Structure formats: C-alpha cells, structure tokens
Image (cartoon, rainbow, N blue to C red):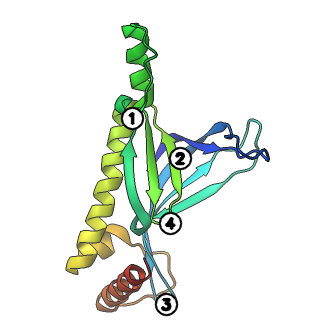
Amino acid sequence: MGYALVNHQQLIDDVPDEEGDWVGRSVTLILKPGTCNVMEVKAPYLEWATLGGGQQNGVETTQVSLLDIHSIAMSSAEDMAFNDGEDNKENDAEEVEDLECFFSLTTKQGQIHVMEAITADESQRLVAGVRNLASRLAKQLITGDKAVLWDFFDNSLEPEEIRVTEEEAMARVSHTLLDYMSKS
C-alpha cells in the first residue's frame, strides 16, 4: 500500500550565496520489506518514486532504510513566523493548515527529505506510522523476536537454494544490525 505525497527538493543554482527555489513533485511512498538470504541481508525501507510528466519527464526513485531514519517530524505554525502582524484569522488558519501538511524525514547521514501530505491529519498519520515502524523494527531486532522475520522481511520470491532457516535468518539479521550500529 502506498501513500500519495509531494516530495519537495531545493533546486541549487550555479549562483553562489543565493538560495535555490523549491520544487514539489508527486510521489507514492511505499514500505518495502527487507530480504535475508545466503547472499545478502537488506533492512526494510521506505521507497518513493517521482511520477513522470510536467517539466521533468524523468522518474527518480529514493530509498531510505528504516534503520537509517534519524528523525521524522511534522512542521507546525510555531516553527514558522508566518504572521506578518495583520489580524486576518481566516488566512492565518489556512496558512497553519498548509504548514501542518509538511513533514521532514532526516537520515543518519544528514539527508533531509521534505514531504507534503494532502491534509494535516494525513501528515500526522504518516509521521506516527513511520515512527512506529522504525521503533517496532528496532525493538524486535534488539529483543531477538522472531516475528521480525514475518513482519519486516519477505523471501517468498527468492530461489529455494539461497533461502535460510529461521534460526540462521535471525543470526544474520542480528549480526547485520550489530555491524550496522558499529559503523554509525
């Protein structure tokens, strides 16, 4: 299942000391399961691909591992100085609603991905959902809960000769997590 969003990216001009413009492109955000087999262990990840069309026909795909998420946060009116001193409650309410549709996902490598949901409620649901997924994955990995294999990994399309037993999969996933954490 995917969620329709807008991914905002800053266009960097060749002019130094000037900020680039921001461009939004429609994307679909999908949770992809990880894999664990004889050849590799890949953590589950979020993936989004821009839709072709408009001024840019190219399709761009981005993947962020659930283990690479440093933070995910919604924007709020308190984050922005949007009121210019005029008392226009109707416009202020619309601006607050517009601002609360945005959220950012920051990776451990420092990449920041700015997204815009259709509504503020949808943004809250997505932020809470991603937080819960990352938390649940980490908890199951740390506690050695074998449910992590069914909840976050899918080897059903893998050839039989590279599949591993449940015990071997847990050992591989645990070792990969330890290796990953030692490099962070």
Disc 3 designates what residue?
Answer: 162
Mark 1 vs mark 3, foreground winner is 1
Looking at the image, the residue that sits furthest to the right is: 14
Residue 47 visible to an observer of this rendering: yes
Cβ atoms at labels 2 and 4 below 8 Å apart: no
**Label 2 or label 3, whichever comes before in sequence order:** 2
Q: Is residue 184 above or below residue 110?
A: below
Q: Secondary structure at mark 1?
A: helix
* Residue at horizontal 42 percent and vertical 12 percent from the top: 85
Disc 2 designates what residue?
Answer: 28
Looking at the image, the residue that sits furthest to the front is: 17
Q: CA distance from mark 2 to mark 4?
A: 23 Å
Mark 2 vs mark 4, foreground winner is 4
Q: CA distance from mark 2 to mark 1?
A: 26 Å
**Label 2 or label 1, whichever comes before in sequence order:** 2
The disc placed on residue 79 is 1
**Label 4 or label 1, whichever comes before in sequence order:** 1
Query: Is the residue marked by circle 3 packed among few (<14), some (14-19), or many (20+) residues within 10 Å?
Result: few
Q: Secondary structure at mark 2?
A: strand
**Label 4 or label 3, whichever comes before in sequence order:** 4
The disc placed on residue 94 is none
